[in-house]
Amino acid sequence: MGDSFHDQLIEDSRFLKDDRRLDTELVDKLILQLNRIYPQILTDKEATRFRDLDVPTCVRLGELLTHLQGKGEEACREFYRALHLHVEEVYFSLPTRLRLRDSADPLAYPGVYKQRYVLNDRGPAFFLSCFSIAVGMALLYYYSEAKVSGGSRALGVAALGLGRKAREVLIWYTEESLMK
């Protein structure tokens, strides 16, 4: 459970070897990234050996991980950087990444643990007013306009406090019922 990239790579190696998302093409991208950007980590000869298509991908990946662990901390860090660049979904599902994310201090990282089901932050009065409008519209729908006291005048009065679109719908509804 060390904090170094070397220790993390040792812990993540089993997961990486078993992950089916790392196919031949993605492993080749990782090898080429390390070879082109950091030839001191992975020489041309080593890159050619790890890109041999006659060897199964999981074996090549296992040998690459062992090789990088032998190269030290810098090589392991650059492997994680390449993995993050090319295969982000695998990078974020690594056991060490999940452990680091889950063990994050909520006070140090307030954005990590946000409340999940916040619909609004306007308070209970806003909710009650929206709920009241919805109940009122439902009552108007289920009980015809003739049963509501005041007939179409009630809808006209209700339209005063609403937005333009809602007002147009209510006024259209009253005009429609007056024509019948």
Image: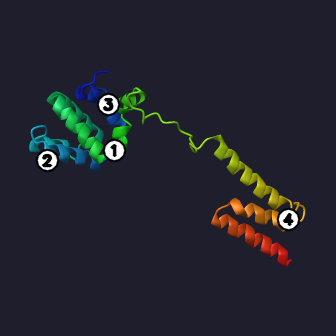
Q: CA distance from mark 2 to mark 4?
A: 76 Å
> What amino acid is found at the position of numbered circle 1 in the picture?
Glu
Q: Are marks 2 and 1 in contact (CB under 8 Å)?
A: no
The 10 Å Cα crowd at callout 3, few under 14, some 14 to 19, many 20 or more, is: some
> What amino acid is found at the position of numbered circle 3 in the picture?
Asp
Task: Give the residue pinned by disc 2.
Answer: 36
Q: CA distance from mark 4 to mark 3?
A: 68 Å
Q: Is residue 74 left or right of residue 101?
A: left
Q: CA distance from mark 2 to mark 3?
A: 24 Å
Q: Is residue 24 left or right of residue 125?
A: left
Task: Give the residue pinned by disc 3.
Answer: 12
Q: Is residue 162 above or below residue 171?
A: above
Q: Is residue 81 visible?
A: yes
**In front of the other: 72 or 19:** 72
Q: Quadrant of residue 166?
A: bottom right
- Of the two numbered discs 4 and 1 on the same chain, state the one appearing first in sequence: 1
> What amino acid is found at the position of numbered circle 2 in the picture?
Arg
- The residue sitting at 30% across, 31% down in the picture is 13
> What amino acid is found at the position of numbered circle 4 in the picture?
Glu
- Of the two numbered discs 1 and 3 on the same chain, state the one appearing first in sequence: 3
Q: Is residue 54 visible?
A: no
**For the residue labelled by badge 2, is the local secondary structure a helix, a strand or a loop?**
helix
Q: Quadrant of residue 8?
A: top left
- Of the two numbered discs 2 and 1 on the same chain, state the one appearing first in sequence: 2
Task: Give the residue pinned by disc 1.
Answer: 88
Q: Residue furthest top?
A: 1
- Of the two numbered discs 4 and 3 on the same chain, state the one appearing first in sequence: 3
Instruction: Nearest to the eye among marks 4 and 1: give it.
Output: 4
